[in-house]
Amino acid sequence: ENIDKLLELSKNKIIEIGCQFRMHPNLIKLNQILQKKETANLLTYRLAMGQRLDAWRKNVDYKKGYSSDEKRGGGALFDLIHQIDIAIWLFGPVLSVNAVLSKRSELLISGDDVTNLLLTHTNGLTGHIQLDMASPVYRCEAEVMTGDSIFKWSFSDSSLYNYKTEKKEIINKLDDEYHRNSMFIDHMKHFEIHHKQ
């Protein structure tokens, strides 16, 4: 609804959706690796993001926030969009989506709290995205399988690993000075550079 109004407001303006994980150094490195010919033999991927909603935003009553109300854009699918954006960024446009939206936890929310997506991209690759508002432990992670490697990343660990037969290698690790807010600042810088062009 109201897309025509958004289009009218956007005339003669530069607009960018701020999905800040595109600015995470570990994922930038993963994207660079996946663009190389030797890792072009992609087989599948798994992305996950989730945390119990009542633990996620501790300073507010989770039942009153928009995240708990699907009519206001809440629920796992509508609220946790970053893994979907990562999939499109790393693997290209999506051809088809199969989804199961579930209400599995005891949390008092009207939207889905456990969602599973199976995406097939235009290049033929199929991958799995799991989104939730019910996990007892915060999860934000990626696993990409190629013919000879499995790449694993976790936001909490701030490291990108390459697993091969009997071998585990850290291929990108952030130092302790890196902060979550850096992604947002870098995204704003990216927008500013693009806007000046």
Image (tube, rainbow, N blue to C red):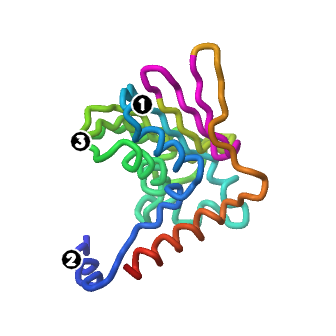
Q: Residues within 10 Å of mark 1 (few under 14, many from 20)?
A: some
Residue 180's place in the image compared with 84, above or below, is below
Task: Give coordinates of residue 192: x percent, y percent.
Answer: 47, 78
Q: Secondary structure at mark 2?
A: helix
**Eyeballing the image, is 123 above or below 93?**
above
Q: Residue tagged by mark 3?
A: 95
Taken as a whole, is the magenta stretch helix, strand or loop?
strand
Farthest front residue? 37
In which quadrant of the rendered view does residue 1 lie?
bottom left
Do callouts 1 and 2 mark residues in contact (Cβ within 8 Å)? no
Disc 3, SS: strand
Residue 172: image location, x then y, percent: 64, 42
**Residue 186 falls left or right of residue 45:** right
Q: Which mark is residue 4?
A: 2
- Label 1 sits on residue: 39
Q: Inspect the image, locate mark 3, and give the three-letter code of the amino acid beneath it.
A: Leu
Residue type for callout 2: Asp
Q: Tell me which residue sits at (62%, 37%) in the image.
A: 171
N-terminal label among 1 and 3: 1
Residue 176 location in percent, x, y? 78, 53
* 2 vs 3, front mark: 3
Q: Which residues are magenta?
A: 145-164
